[in-house]
Amino acid sequence: MSRKNGGSAASSGNDGPERGPLLFWMIFTGLSIFAGVLLWRYGLIRLMVRSDRTYLSSIIAVLYVITSCHCFWRTRKIAREGDAAGRCRAILSAADGSKALAVDANVLPPGLVTDHIKSLVTKAETQGAGKGAGRIDQTLLLRSLADRLRGSNGFGAFASDTLMKLGLLGTIIGFIIMLAPIAGLDAADKVAMKSSMGLMSDGMAVAMYTTLAGLVGSILVRIQYYMLDTATQRVFSDAVTLTETRVTPALERSHLERRHDG
């Protein structure tokens, strides 16, 4: 009974920290929304949308929202994987935790870490059936686990680069709008001069607002996916520690016992 309570306590103790990535994302997004509300309250966002005739700033804002939703989905998934890894650690750390490594034992919670452990068990069984059975090498399986955990995290770098380049594109378009009236400008025509100054001001506004939107959006996306990559690396590190200290020694010990009995 005490062993069961100890396992439950370990599981509940690991649940809190593993939800950290999702909590950090929510705090960061909440601060970003608060900043956006302040900018809207003081009319800066409306001024940007009204001044940008190319609508690139609005496109950048929409892409940022879509990217943030993708980051939330990935962060939620990684948080769940972290919870599952914590429960696996609690189960395997128990006195009879090696029983959970049986092929037909569905004790471990579903997740990528559990799939990796099951692959290790299958490899140990297959390797044990051969003549050259020895230490279990999980290098290739760990590479596969890392790729599966990383998933579509690379979309963050692509989105950040895209937002930056859209901002630079708006800069170029803005300078084109600003410099276009100069070619046919007549210094003696005051009406044309006034119209040209208005066009130059519009072009400068397009260049500045799109550059600002692209830079801010790119930086915010980078921060979000940096937190996501850090959480992913932590889950992978926990999986490596768990398998190297609990799973592979138990499998190798079980194989040696079978060889001695045979």
Image (cartoon, rainbow, N blue to C red):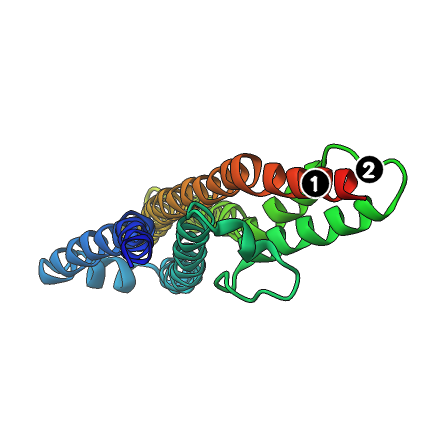
Can you say whether 119 is above or below 168 in the image?
below
Mark 2 nearby-residue class (10 Å; few <14, some 14–19, many ≥20): some
Q: Nearer the viewer, residue 33 or 118?
A: 118
Q: Which mark is residue 86?
A: none
Extreme residue in the top direction: 135
- The residue identified by callout 1 is 257
Q: Tell me: 168 left or right of 206.
A: right
- Element assignment for label 1: helix
Q: Nearer the viewer, residue 219 or 237?
A: 237
For the N terminus, the quadrant is bottom left
Q: Say which quarter of the image contains residue 34.
A: bottom left
Whether residue 225 is visible, yes or no, is yes
Whether residue 193 is visible, yes or no, is no
Extreme residue in the front direction: 261
Q: Nearer the viewer, mark 2 or mark 1?
A: 1
Q: Residue at x 48, y 51 (%)?
A: 97
Where residue 63 appears, as percent x and y from the top left, is: 43, 61
Q: Amino acid at mark 2?
A: Ala
Where residue 56 appears, as percent x and y from the top left, is: 42, 59
For the C terminus, the quadrant is top right
Q: Residue at x 30, y 54 (%)?
A: 15
- Element assignment for label 2: loop
Q: Say which quarter of the image contains residue 128.
A: top right
Q: Say which label, 2 or 1, has the lower sequence index.
A: 2
Q: Nearer the viewer, residue 105 or 95?
A: 95
Where residue 124 appears, as percent x and y from the top left, is: 73, 46
- The residue identified by callout 2 is 133
